[in-house]
Image: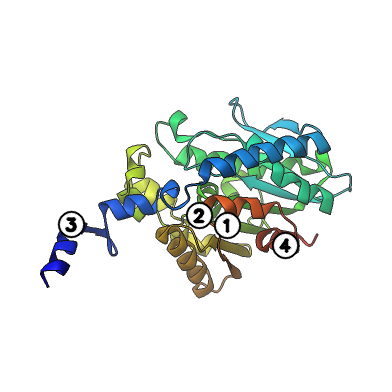
């Protein structure tokens, strides 16, 4: 009995579900559960270099007025082709889509255009996530309005994303698109891999040290609370070696979408951690790569 009491005392007060502050902080710190983070990132950079060698440098296109507001386009030779828009992760911190070019080749070889979006990290927004959500939404709207200029089909736009990029993409697929001058069904399907869809527990974690969470941010950017605006099929995915919270967030989001009567597929990757999930997005025979190609009908 005393041993149990001592364990509970050492654990500290519960702050979210059955987690104390340290457990919650760890559950939103990928490196705690995936110590090979740097190794996987090096692979991504290496493989992105190789893809650029094979496909050539992407075309750089501006979707906004800020220097960071640009897209990398790897175009297919097929006319009027579907478009895959990738929203990268990185804990909402500054990172460039250049490190994810390795994902482009699968789409291009299959007959689609691949577009990677660059946008601000919280370091450049004073910790505010709202401008970042606006940037990726504007990028999608720009692609729809300009698709024909690069041989793309504006009626076949799909979104793929991972980690904090999947959080932003959860907000993309629950956007009121009238505010951006494009149709409500501008996105025809999305892969949301290892994302966050309810910001309440994230706000309670140590991520609040660098993200300026407010009631407005939590409410507006918790996509699970706005499923009435979801207007496309979604594939939700996570790995069994991800943190407990990232597994729960994705399970519960998929369940909420299903309960709302919207089309959803939940994919669980056995033996994959958070960072390894991204590698599957560019592999046509993997769980995620094949799902993307099926969704895009490629």
Q: Nearer the viewer, mark 4 or mark 1?
A: 4
* Whole-number angstrom distance, CA of label 2 to CA of label 4: 19 Å
The residues tagged by marks 4 and 1 sit, at their Cα atoms, a distance apart of: 14 Å
Which residue is identified by label 1? Answer: 192
Question: Residue 199, how many percent across, how many down?
Answer: 39, 53
Count neighbours of disc 3 (C-alpha within 10 A) and say few if under 14, some if 14 to 19, many if 20 or more. Answer: few
Mark 4 crowd level (few <14, some 14–19, many ≥20, 10 Å Cα): some
Query: Label 1 near label 2: C-beta < 8 Å?
Result: yes
Measure the alpha-carbon separation of dots 2 and 1. Answer: 6 Å
Q: Is residue 256 left or right of residue 103?
A: left
Taking 127 as reference, is 258 above or below it?
Answer: below
Task: From the image, state whether disc 3 or disc 4 is nearer to you.
Answer: 3
Report how far apart the C-alphas of labels 3 and 1 lie in the structure: 36 Å
Mark closer to the chain start, 3 or 1? 3
Q: Which mark is residue 195?
A: 2
Q: CB atoms at circles 2 and 4 under 8 Å apart?
A: no
Closer to the camera, 271 or 71? 271
Q: Residue furthest right?
A: 78
């Amino acid at each position: 009995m005393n041993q149990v009491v001592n364990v509970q005392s050492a654990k500290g007060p519960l702050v979210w579900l059955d987690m104390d502050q340290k457990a919650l902080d760890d559950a939103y710190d990928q490196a705690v559960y995936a110590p090979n983070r740097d190794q996987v990132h090096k692979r991504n950079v290496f493989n992105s270099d190789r893809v650029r060698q094979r496909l050539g440098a992407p075309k750089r296109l501006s979707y906004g007025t800020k220097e960071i507001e640009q897209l990398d386009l790897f175009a297919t030779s097929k006319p009027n082709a579907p478009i895959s828009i990738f929203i990268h992760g990185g804990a909402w911190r500054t990172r460039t889509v250049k490190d994810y070019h390795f994902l482009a080749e699968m789409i291009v070889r299959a007959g689609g255009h691949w577009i990677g979006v660059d946008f601000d990290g919280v370091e450049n927004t004073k910790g505010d996530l709202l401008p970042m959500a606006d940037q990726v939404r504007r990028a999608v709207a720009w692609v729809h309005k300009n698709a024909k200029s690069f041989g793309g089909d504006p009626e076949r736009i799909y979104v793929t994303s991972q980690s904090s990029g999947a959080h932003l993409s959860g907000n993309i697929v629950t956007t009121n698109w009238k505010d951006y001058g494009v149709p409500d069904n501008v996105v025809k399907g999305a892969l949301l891999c290892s994302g966050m869809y309810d910001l309440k527990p994230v706000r309670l974690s140590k991520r609040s040290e660098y993200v300026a969470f407010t009631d407005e941010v939590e409410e507006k950017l918790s996509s699970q609370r706005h499923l009435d605006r979801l207007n496309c099929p979604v594939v939700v995915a996570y790995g069994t070696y991800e943190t407990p919270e990232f597994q729960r967030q994705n399970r519960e989001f998929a369940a909420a979408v299903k309960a709302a009567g919207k089309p959803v597929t939940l994919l669980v990757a056995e033996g994959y951690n958070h960072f390894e999930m991204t590698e599957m997005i560019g592999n046509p025979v993997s769980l995620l790569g094949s799902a993307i190609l099926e969704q895009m009908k490629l």
